[in-house]
Image (cartoon, helix red, strand yellow):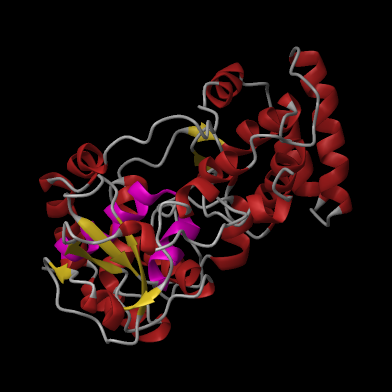
Amino acid sequence: MAPTLSTCRRAATLVVALALCLTGSGAGVAQDEAGFQAFVQILAREAASRGVSRATIDAVVPTLRLNPRVIALDRAQPGSDPTAPIPDFAPYKARHVDAQRIAGGRAAYQAQRARLAQIERETGVPESIMVAIWGHETSYGAVTGGFDLAQALATLAYEGRRRDLFTEEFVAALKIVDGGVPRSKLVGSWAGAMGGPQFLPSVYLRLARDGDGDGKVDIWSSPADTLASIASYFSDAGWRPGEPWGLAVSVPASLDRTRLGAATVSPRCPKVFARHSKWRTVAEWRTLGIMPLTKSWPANNVQATLLEPDGPGKTGYLLTGNYRVILDYNCSNFYALSVGLLADAVEN
């Protein structure tokens, strides 16, 4: 059974949503500019029925043109092959938790420290986690994408494989314009992710926040708004204040992994969650000979799963419920581990 639309749209960015929605409800195939122009009139009527103003519709819809490059990029996305081998984490870590990204994160951390501290007090989301997400998504605001968002979303809705998803996001983009954000700001990735946090338009409407108190929610040019919006997402997804995301550990060679048990099957990203052991308390992991490598132990009653991304004999990770919140942002073990490790490096 394919994931539901609501499940697909839970992820913060549309690139993540695409991975969850490889099979969509639309069956149309993009043909030409004339067909696209007829289709955008359907989108216009849908937007009007959802309460988007006629002024916004008339300002945006006539400017839309089919973008074949967006369709090509969408179709080039790899499928989810459950039989494909999983590569080692170490090369990914080397690319994403590198000296340049750590240095940039530390600079951003210091530059935004006053606001970060306030946001953490309000939400319980650690300053370093906000910065690490910002760094992973857009290199601290340096790379946010150059596609016209409304055009890209309309093109992908017309292409048809995930028509419901992209129609929803197109309407959300028009609602953002209706709310006072200039159309010129709606620029982002080919798949509709935008701003410093790379939010979907629907996620922006639901969770984006004003972090600098100017009365606007500008995730495109305000670092404070970007960081407050990231924290809002994490808080909404269930971040537990005071609990670490996880820690790197040494796993004894004598550990009988067959007795650890597999994680509960997840309806979302099952291949990601299947790599985790069952939940155990920190106290139980300690009795099994697990030893921390870089951090002190969290409280003995904290629940954690074990993940060995590079297999036995290499660094393992005990991962708490807060790690699952990072996965909610982007359902990839490599991404979530790198965010956590970058956060640790930024604050040290």
Q: Main secondary structure of the magenta part?
A: helix
In the displayed structure, does residue 214 sit left or right of residue 348? right
In the displayed structure, does residue 3 sit left or right of residue 232? right
Residue 192 visible in the shown view? no
Is residue 91 inside the magenta stretch? no
Which residue is at a point 85% across and 32% down the rendered structure image?
41
The image position of residue 198, as x and y in percent, is 46, 49
Q: Quadrant of residue 324?
A: bottom left
Rendered-image quadrant of the C terminus? bottom left
Which residue is at a point 37% across and 64% down the rendered structure image?
260
The image position of residue 79, as x and y in percent, is 55, 29
In the displayed structure, does residue 276 sit left or right of residue 256? right
Residue numbers of the magenta segment: 321-346
The image position of residue 316, as x and y in percent, is 23, 57
Residue 310 visible in the shown view? yes
The image position of residue 132, as x and y in percent, is 28, 58
Rendered-image quadrant of the N terminus? top right
Which residue is at a point 11% across and 65% down the rendered structure image?
293
Q: Quadrant of residue 306?
A: bottom left
In the displayed structure, does residue 275 sit left or right of residue 308? right
Q: Quadrant of residue 344?
A: bottom left
